[in-house]
Image: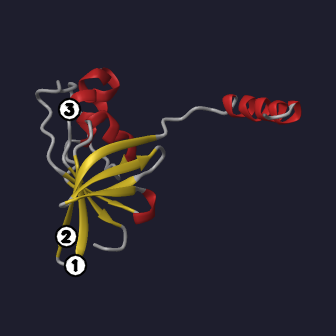
Amino acid sequence: MPNLSEFEEFVTRSQSLVNQPVYHDEFVYPGLVIEQAGRQWLQITPPLGEALQFLQYNLVERPSPETCPTIDELEISPVTARVERHAIHVESLGKSMCLVTIPGGTKMQVITGADWWDPAVQLMKTDPDATATQQVLLSLVFEGED
């Protein structure tokens, strides 16, 4: 049975944890592991709204669309992005299947396929519910392996 000082210490530690800021801890997706030409790729299909939180795209100066597209008008092509191997956790489920855990705050650099980026960001600002269910096919290549 714990003594009173151990209990007080537990309460103090618990209170300090409760007062910490809360962040979205992680995103978890089922995925496929693909071995091709000596490289390992992962494929996941996150909701568009979540993908926009961890994908980074180098924006080029271009005019904004006159009108914001609807989710039905947005044509989302597959995306390839770079990520550092240590930045995500991949748990093998066997037979090329896995669970991919992406910690909150992780950033991935888009390599190809983000021609829909600007309209998607605009849509997320005007109708976030629409981007919550639309999925995007995302292929991940590990940094330094492309």
**Quadrant of image for the N terminus:** top right
> At label 3, which amino acid type do we have?
Gln
Instruction: Relative to 105, say whether 124 is above or below.
Output: above
Q: CA distance from mark 1 to mark 3?
A: 32 Å
Which picture quadrant has residue 20? top right
Q: Secondary structure at mark 3?
A: loop
On the image, numbered disc 1 is attached to which residue? 38
**Cβ atoms at labels 1 and 2 below 8 Å apart:** yes
Earlier sequence position, callout 1 versus callout 3: 1
Which picture quadrant has residue 65? top left
Q: Residues within 10 Å of mark 1 (few under 14, many from 20)?
A: few
Instruction: Pick the residue in front: 3 or 136.
Output: 3
Say which mark, if any, is on residue 1. none
Question: In this figure, which colouring scheme has been used for the structure?
Answer: secondary structure
Say which mark, if any, is on residue 134. 3
Q: CA distance from mark 1 to mark 2?
A: 7 Å
